């Protein structure tokens, strides 16, 4: 599922964030750049429109448009339906394997949850830290201040007893803000990429993201990657049902995003009636579920430009990678998979990863994806 890390805060006032502290106090949220994002998403949206004007490859609307307060409520309904297996599979994995994960990480680890969103599933992991009496700090990284306020309040309610060993806080900002900030955290760190966040891109882009994070890891650091490995060849119906058992919710989700786009632009360019809401499953070069819009008519953009009838705009795509490809991606990013776990009866997996040591055996398996480097 697409990353939410750069959504919301669209109308937040511009002010310099306070970056003095490395981690927030228990229950607090540290501004690492979230309050300085005014205008960023306007630029991203305008780049999408420029891609249409310049006839570039299929343009893509920013996913960030989808996740205002209203969009977050709709999204939480979507991920809770029975057919949306990623949420339920990841909870099952934490219930089964949290103790083993904890045995592989140093005591007093600081967890940074990349694009945390709804923290209900990760609390199954935090509960095991409490049960095993292993001190740890959990930091939810998100760009939605509203989401962080709600999530951290909920977590603090579960981790504020006299015997609690888990501290919880939030980091308000983007992936880029986090990459600049995490060097201040001196404790061992474990980065959480849950719900197919970090690798949810075409292969070269996903590999690039993974390399960026790998470059920040110290020898004692760990990365826990959740990745959907269901592929079209074997699971077409299961994948399709995950995204189309609640079409009314998805439509409301996208319509709300179009309204946010219009607010940013300052005029009504995107009218629901002018667009067909489409979807398809691709098998090559990798499995991808694709939502996209198709213009029903020519739509004036101003300045003599127009969105032509039939123009497609991608939005909210979801890439799937099987175990072999995730292991290859990690290898090429300079990482070693310590252990992987599959959810019961599922091809959704979690991978516990560390930086590759000099003595690690280098294995570079052949890939079915062309152009991998």
Image (tube, rainbow, N blue to C red):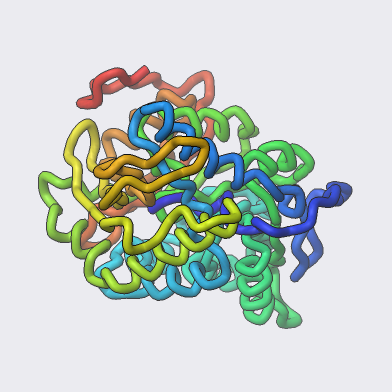
Can residue 124 be seen? no
| Residue 309, image quadrant | top left
Q: Residue at x 47, y 51 (%)?
A: 63
Task: Return the residue nearer the eye: 300 or 43.
Answer: 300
Q: How many tags in the picture? A: 0
Q: Residue at x 78, y 57 (%)?
A: 13
- Between residue 51 and residue 316, name the one nearer to us: 51
Up-down: is 334 above or below 116?
above
In the picture, measured across the screen, residue 188 lies left or right of residue 254, that is right
In the depicted view, which residue is nearer to us: 142 or 306?
Answer: 306
Looking at the image, residue 122 lies above or below residue 1: below
Q: Residue at coordinates 52% horizontally, 55% vertically from top-left?
A: 261
Q: Where is residue 248 shown, x and y percent of the image?
A: 29, 73
- The answer to which image quadrant residue 322 occupies is top left
Query: Taking 282 as reference, is 163 left or right?
Result: right
Q: Is residue 3 visible?
A: yes
In the rendered image, the vertical position of residue 2 relative to residue 327, given as above or below:
below
Front residue of 366/269: it is 269
Query: Where's the C terminus, which quadrant?
Result: top left
Q: Position of residue 139 (x, y in %)?
A: 66, 58
Q: Position of residue 295 (x, y in %)?
A: 29, 49
- Residue lying at the far front of the rendered structure: 304
Look at 67% across and 52% down and name the residue there: 110
User: In the shown orientation, is residue 276 left or right of residue 185?
Assistant: left
Q: Position of residue 318 (x, y in %)?
A: 33, 48
Q: Is residue 267 above or below residue 287?
A: below
């Amino acid at each position: 599922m697409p990353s939410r890390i750069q959504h919301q805060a669209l109308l937040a006032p511009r002010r310099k964030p306070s970056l003095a502290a490395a981690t927030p106090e228990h229950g607090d949220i540290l501004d690492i750049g979230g309050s300085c994002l005014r205008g960023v998403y306007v630029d991203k949206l305008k780049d999408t429109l420029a891609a249409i004007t310049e006839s570039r490859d299929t343009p893509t609307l920013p996913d960030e448009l989808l996740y205002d307060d209203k969009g977050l409520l709709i999204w939480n309904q979507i991920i809770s339906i029975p057919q949306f297996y990623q949420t339920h599979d990841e909870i099952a994995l934490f219930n089964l394997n949290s103790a083993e994960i904890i045995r592989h990480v140093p005591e007093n680890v600081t967890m940074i949850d990349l694009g945390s969103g709804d923290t209900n599933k990760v609390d199954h992991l935090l509960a095991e830290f409490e049960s095993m009496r292993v001190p740890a700090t959990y930091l939810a990284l998100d760009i939605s201040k509203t989401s962080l306020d709600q999530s951290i309040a909920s977590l603090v309610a579960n981790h504020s007893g006299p015997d609690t060993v888990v501290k919880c806080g939030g980091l308000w900002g983007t992936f880029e803000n986090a990459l600049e900030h995490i060097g201040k955290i001196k404790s061992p760190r474990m980065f959480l990429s849950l719900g197919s966040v970090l690798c949810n891109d075409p292969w070269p882009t996903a590999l690039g993201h993974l390399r960026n994070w790998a470059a920040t890891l110290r020898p004692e650091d760990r990365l826990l990657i959740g990745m959907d490995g269901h592929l079209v060849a074997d699971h077409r119906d299961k994948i399709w049902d995950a995204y189309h058992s609640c079409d009314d919710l998805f439509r409301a989700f996208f319509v709300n995003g179009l309204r946010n786009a219009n607010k940013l632009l300052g005029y009504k360019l995107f009218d629901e009636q002018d667009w067909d809401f489409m979807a398809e499953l691709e098998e090559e070069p990798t499995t991808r579920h694709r939502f996209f819009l198709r213009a029903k008519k020519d739509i004036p953009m101003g300045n003599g430009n127009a969105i032509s009838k039939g123009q497609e705009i991608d939005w909210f795509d979801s890439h799937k990678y099987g175990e072999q490809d995730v292991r290859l991606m990690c290898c090429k990013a300079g990482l070693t998979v310590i252990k992987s776990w599959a959810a019961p009866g599922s091809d959704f997996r979690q991978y516990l990863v560390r930086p590759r040591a000099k003595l690690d055996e280098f294995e570079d398996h052949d890939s079915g994806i062309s152009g991998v480097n």
